[in-house]
Image (spheres, rainbow, N blue to C red):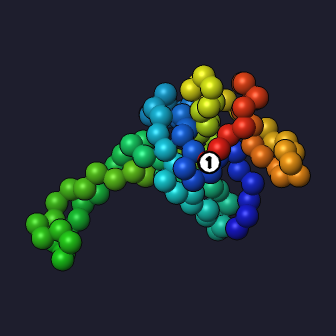
Amino acid sequence: MNKKLHIRKGDTVCVNAGEDKGKQGRVLEIVFDKKKGRTRAIVEGVNMVTKHTKPNNKNKTGGFVKKEAPVHVSNLNPLDPKSKKPTRVGRRLVDDKLVRYAKRSGEVIKA
């Protein structure tokens, strides 16, 4: 699905709502849920949950595994490349290509 979002895989983002408000991390994956119509992102080190696992070939003893859970994209803002603060995103044409730019400084955001 080619939905245009303000964040992409590889972006460094800041959480602006919820339990992990203020935390920063890199987007590892974007998760689309067609049935419920929502888009979520898995962010490195944010929204950690404890998952119970049975013993298997990878994990012989089983037990607890800490893992990132998805966060709704509306609760994430990309960081401005210049000031490293959260910013809103705009789109503009540069060399006949649509690129994302930070509204805070005007810098182009590279994913």
16 to 69, vertically: above or below:
above
Asked whether the viewer can see residue 60, the reply is yes
Q: Residue at the front extreme?
A: 95
Q: Amino acid at mark 1?
A: Ala
- Mark 1 Cα shell of 10 Å, populated few (<14), some (14-19), many (≥20): few
The x and y percentages for residue 56 are 19, 75
Secondary structure of the residue carrying numbered label 1: loop
Say which of 70 and 86 sits in front: 86
- Quadrant of image for the N terminus: bottom right
The x and y percentages for residue 81 are 62, 31
Asked whether the viewer can see residue 89, the reply is no
Give the tally of numbered discs: 1
The x and y percentages for residue 42 are 49, 52
Drawn side of residue 58 relative to residue 110, left or right: left
Question: Which residue does the numbered mark 1 point to in the structure image?
Answer: 111
Residue 64 picture quarter: bottom left
| Residue lying at 55% horizontally and 38% vertically, measured from the top left | 13
Drawn side of residue 55 relative to residue 76, left or right: left
| Residue lying at 16% horizontally and 71% vertically, measured from the top left | 55
Residue 34 picture quarter: bottom right
Q: Residue at the bottom extreme?
A: 57
Q: Residue at the left extreme?
A: 61
The x and y percentages for residue 33 are 61, 64
| Residue lying at 34% horizontally and 49% vertically, measured from the top left | 49
